[in-house]
Amino acid sequence: MRKRLALIAHDGKKPEMVAFVKDHYDILSQMDLTATGTTGGYIEQTGLDVDKKLSGPKGGDAQIAAMTAEGKLDGIIFFRDPLGKHPHEPDVQMLMRICDVANVPIATNPATAKLILDGFKAI
């Protein structure tokens, strides 16, 4: 069964997300990917198919949180910018809380994202 993974990145982390996707293209190409709108557009440029939701500030984080609550995701990679101000921070906090409630792994940096992918390979 294909794993279902959501990819999100704050604006300052989008280049880091693209680099991560390129570095892990082989495993990501075997998954069903969902992303917030702008992040998804960047990821599509790598050649991967992505189900794009709204951009984060317009409700994309909330859409991905809903998918998580409904059991439609196996993991989330969300490269957050901890030093920036984000008007949709309540949605980010909701997403993280739902991941905890639903027991869905969420990685907020490349090191933990790699661990999630390694874990998916082992299953």
Image (cartoon, rainbow, N blue to C red):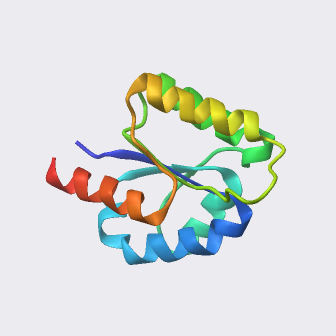
Pick whichever, 113 or 4, lies toward us. 113
Pick whichever, 48 or 63, lies toward us. 63
Q: Give the residue at the far left of this rendering.
A: 122
x and y, in percent, of residue 36 in the image: 64, 50
Seen in the picture, residue 3 relative to 41 is either above or below; the reply is: above
**What quarter of the picture does the N terminus occupy?**
top left
What residue lies at 40% left-to-right and 58% top-to-bottom?
113
x and y, in percent, of residue 30 in the image: 30, 59
What residue lies at 20% left-to-right and 56% top-to-bottom?
121
Q: Is residue 3 left or right of residue 97?
A: left
x and y, in percent, of residue 35 in the image: 57, 51
Seen in the picture, residue 38 relative to 36 is either above or below; the reply is: below
Q: Quadrant of residue 89?
A: top right
x and y, in percent, of residue 14 in the image: 64, 68
What residue lies at 31% left-to-right and 57% top-to-bottom?
115
Seen in the picture, residue 25 relative to 92 is either above or below; the reply is: below
Q: How many marks?
A: 0
